[in-house]
Amino acid sequence: MYLYLIRHGEAKDAAEDPERGLTDPGAADARKMGNFLKKTLVDTKTKILSIQHSGKKRAEQTARIVAQALRLDIPVEFHRGLAPNDDISIIKEELITLRLGSLVIVGHLPHLSRLASSLLADDERRDVVHFPPAGMACLRFTGDNETGSWALEWMVTPEMTGN
């Protein structure tokens, strides 16, 4: 199973947009991440089950842009427990049962950082992965539910994609 964690793209200031939608560069970066992920999926033959987001405008926009770039018929859906300060145990418990396919989560700091740290180092307070706006980390689960573990496969930022 692969877990793709994506931080939302650059958001507008709350004074400009109270819902904090994406800036034009933020949307462009989300598109870069979607295009990069599409190429990666072709190379690895990975099947994405869904793209989940927090429901906040910037995360939903990022998720939809990534989905559009992927050109796959998969759901893009709100998922509780992905907001910036939500308890990571909500999503972590669900990941235990989801071992047959892969998942994209579009979220926020500090939630994504805490989730990655918990999965990789068993300590959500450690800063294991740095997520810049539109940054994406690929985590891979190997083994079974009892003895399995998560590993960081790769990390990419929009600047690294070359798009």
Image: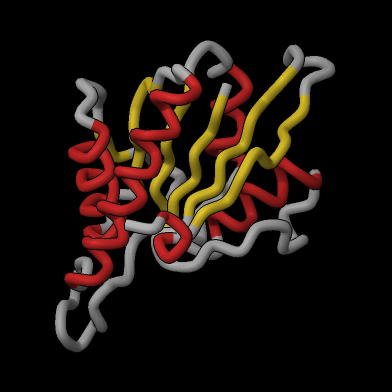
Up/down of 96 relative to 51, above or below: above
Across and down, in percent, residue 159 comes to 43, 65
Image quarter for residue 71? top left
Quadrant (top left, top right, bottom left, bottom right) of the C terminus: bottom left
Quadrant (top left, top right, bottom left, bottom right) of the N terminus: top right
In this view, the residue in front, 123 or 34, is: 34
In this view, the residue in front, 12 or 162, is: 162
Up/down of 122 relative to 21, above or below: above
Image quarter for residue 119? top right
Which residue reaches farthest front?
162
Up/down of 78 relative to 131, above or below: above
Residue 32 visible in this rendered orientation of the protein: yes
Across and down, in percent, residue 79 comes to 36, 38
Tell me which residue sits at (23%, 24%) in the image: 72
Q: How is the image coloured?
A: secondary structure
Q: Is residue 101 left or right of residue 143?
A: left
Across and down, in percent, residue 103 comes to 45, 29
Tell me which residue sits at (31%, 53%) in the image: 32
Which residue reaches farthest right?
147
Across and down, in percent, residue 48 comes to 39, 23
Tell me which residue sits at (53%, 37%) in the image: 91
Report the number of numbered marks. 0
Q: Is residue 57 left or right of residue 151?
A: left
Q: Is residue 108 left or right of residue 125?
A: left
Residue 108 visible in this rendered orientation of the protein: no
